[in-house]
Amino acid sequence: MHSEEGIPVSIEVFPGNTQDTKTFASQVKKAAERFGGGAITFVGDRGMIKSTQVEDLLEQGFHYITAITKPQIESLLAQNVLQMSFFEQELAEIQTDDGIRYILKRNPVRVMEVRNTRNSKFNTIQREVRNQNHYLANHPRAHVEVALKKVTSKCNTLKISDWVHIETSGRTISLTKNEDAFAEESKLDGCYVLKTDLKQEFAGKELIHNRYRDLSLVEQVFRTSKTVELEIRPIHVRNPEHTRAHAFTVMLAYRLVHQLQESWCTIDLTVQEAINELSSLCSTTMLMNGKPKCNLIPTPRPKIKKLLHAAQVTLPEVLPCKGIKVAIRKKLPENRKKPRVLRI
């Protein structure tokens, strides 16, 4: 569960075979009972908030913002609830009699991405047709039916069979594009429709659209937690309580990462790059009578000093030295081969 800024406020671990939609009801209950409920709006993608989840929200008096699938868009177009001309507007809105609002938009960037992908698939089939024709020309005993089956199978794999036409003439395979079917396939490229039960006096269409786009902040949390700095996996524990503790620790670590992002937003460095810079910090061990007494902290370089100042961290001039050896998980394989000791 995340706030509108994408900051995690709670975390829960479920068995690995649990579907995402099955975890939704417990989160709704948590928001209602543990966090006090109130005027809460859940924002989720089309795979998370479906009809059952909407009912769970309405039972608790909550609201929702989600997106609908392409078949649902086509169904609304067939019922004349939506019209294709609406997608040509910057941001269109339709409200039905039952109070449901639909926010419509066509993303031109996504249009180009889908178009390029579709053209790439068509070019792939063209290459396959040329290869098969070349093979048939150089192998008189080869069967045209086998070559045709290979081309057709590839079309099915790439899911473009609805708008391409394949035929044979003698021992030659030809490929053409069905323009009408292609236009029908392309008409909803880049189009998406948001669905919400929020009333207009509480949230305008721009606010609803922006809140849905903020799901990218949540995706960033998952990317940071699963990869990059934190690497929640692999999990080297088997006990369920230990697994939950591990996930909770990662969430707390992400809060630190998020805080560092806020602190270093004016510095042209990512969090990982800044941490790499800070890793060059070192200390000088002072020995008395051949025994470590304390660690002296030298004056950091200007770049490191800037990072520490932005994070409101003040380094002490000296640290006590207990002679304790510290080895982190990532260094263990190296330490087994060639021991390295850090004295603090």
Image (cartoon, rainbow, N blue to C red):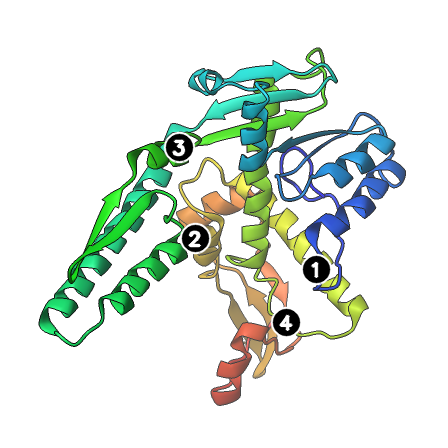
Name the secondary structure under disc 2: helix
Residue nearest the observer in this picture, 276 or 115: 115
Q: Which residue is mark 3?
A: 184
Q: Amino acid at mark 3?
A: Glu
Q: Which mark is residue 247?
A: 1
Residue that extends furthest to the right in the rendered view of this protein: 33
Q: Nearer the viewer, mark 1 or mark 3?
A: 3
Dot 2, how many residues are within 10 Å of its Cα: few (below 14), some (14-19), or many (20+)? few
The earlier-in-sequence mark between 1 and 4 is: 1
Contact, mark 3 vs mark 4 (Cβ under 8 Å): no
Residue found 70% across the figure and 21% down from its top: 100
Q: Is residue 278 above or below residue 214?
A: below
Q: Nearer the viewer, mark 1 or mark 4?
A: 1
Contact, mark 4 vs mark 2 (Cβ under 8 Å): no
Name the secondary structure under disc 3: helix
Residue nearest the observer in this picture, 104 or 1: 104
Q: Which mark is residue 321?
A: 4
Q: Quadrant of residue 326?
A: bottom right
190 to the left or right of 30: left
The earlier-in-sequence mark between 1 and 3 is: 3
Mark pair 2, 3: CA separation: 47 Å
The earlier-in-sequence mark between 4 and 2 is: 2
Q: Nearer the viewer, mark 3 or mark 4?
A: 3
Contact, mark 1 vs mark 2 (Cβ under 8 Å): no
Mark pair 3, 4: CA separation: 73 Å
User: Measured from the top left, where is residue 40 in percent x and y?
Assistant: 77, 29
The earlier-in-sequence mark between 3 and 4 is: 3
Residue nearest the observer in this picture, 330 or 24: 24
